[in-house]
């Protein structure tokens, strides 16, 4: 991924937090010479391996798991907030439109595991992760026969990461006045995605203290 130095994120704590908050990923592998993509929730374990490990599952009917046997590196893309940026929001002129966004690319070689106890543990961990923020979390209790059927219908895998690339393009190369104009416009947008991007800018410390 092309990453200008101003937008490069290498801090493991920030990358880990991003993968936890934006955990629905696009997993890309190669089927011979053809790229193949699936869209999956993936859990990140930052302390497992030098760069952390992703763990997930996909439907057995999905042919992508067969690509794992080739031992090729896969790419998981985690998307954060993004939005169009109008030059009319800048104090500096002339300027052109752009797109601001946050994304993390995770690379590694997937490995399937088929131990039933480990698969059940993965499913329970996944359920707990996504249910924990709900007012009345679903406990995840299922009849044994139904659970066994579900397990037979999935393929569980992990990806020990060889590298992580973070790119947060949030206008760091612009002046404080330009950043303030962008943040103000996004904050008052009718689109929820724009307002989320504005909040992300603030959380990352790219909003001047005078911004409203």
Image (cartoon, rainbow, N blue to C red):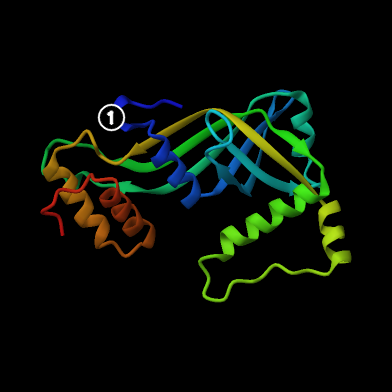
Q: Can you name the residue that lies furthest to the right here? A: 145
Q: In the rendered image, which quarter is residue 126 located in?
A: bottom right
Q: Give coordinates of residue 93: x percent, y percent.
A: 12, 37
Give the vertical position of 178 relative to 5 (above or below): below
Compare residues 55 and 62 and report the one nearer the observer: 55
Q: In the rendered image, which quarter is residue 15 located in?
A: top left
Is residue 159 found left or right of 50 in the rendered image? right
Mark 1 closeness class: few <14, some 14–19, many ≥20 residues within 10 Å: few
Q: Can you name the residue that lies furthest to the bottom here? A: 136
Residue occupying the point 39% across, 41% down: 14
Residue occupying the point 73% across, 24% down: 71
Residue occupying the point 82% across, 54% down: 151
Q: In the rendered image, which quarter is residue 138 located in?
A: bottom right
The local secondary structure at tag 1 comes to: helix
Q: Give coordinates of residue 101: x percent, y percent.
A: 37, 43
Numbered label tally: 1
Quadrant holding the C terminus: bottom left
**Residue ID for mark 1:** 6
Q: Give coordinates of residue 155: x percent, y percent.
A: 78, 45
Q: Give coordinates of residue 94: x percent, y percent.
A: 14, 35
Compare residues 97 and 193 and report the one nearer the observer: 193
Compare residues 137 and 169 and report the one nearer the observer: 137
């Amino acid at each position: 991924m092309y990453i200008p130095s101003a937008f490069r994120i290498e801090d493991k704590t920030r990358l880990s937090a991003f993968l936890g908050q934006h955990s629905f990923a696009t997993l890309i592998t190669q089927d011979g010479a053809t790229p193949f993509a699936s869209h999956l929730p993936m859990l990140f374990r930052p302390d497992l391996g030098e760069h952390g490990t992703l763990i997930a599952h996909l439907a057995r009917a999905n042919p992508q798991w067969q690509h794992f046997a080739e031992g090729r590196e896969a790419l998981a893309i985690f998307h954060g907030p993004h939005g169009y940026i109008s030059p009319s929001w800048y104090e500096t002129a002339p300027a052109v439109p752009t797109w601001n966004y946050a994304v993390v690319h995770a690379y590694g070689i997937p490995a399937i595991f088929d131990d039933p106890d480990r698969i059940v543990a993965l499913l329970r961990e996944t359920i707990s992760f996504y249910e924990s923020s709900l007012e009345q979390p679903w406990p995840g209790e299922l009849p044994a026969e139904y659970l066994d059927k579900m397990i037979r219908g999935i393929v569980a895998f992990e990806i020990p990461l060889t590298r992580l690339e973070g790119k947060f393009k949030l206008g760091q190369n612009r002046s404080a006045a330009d950043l303030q104009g962008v943040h103000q416009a996004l904050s008052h947008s009718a689109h929820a995605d724009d307002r989320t991007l504005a909040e992300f800018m603030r959380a990352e410390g790219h909003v001047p203290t005078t911004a409203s």
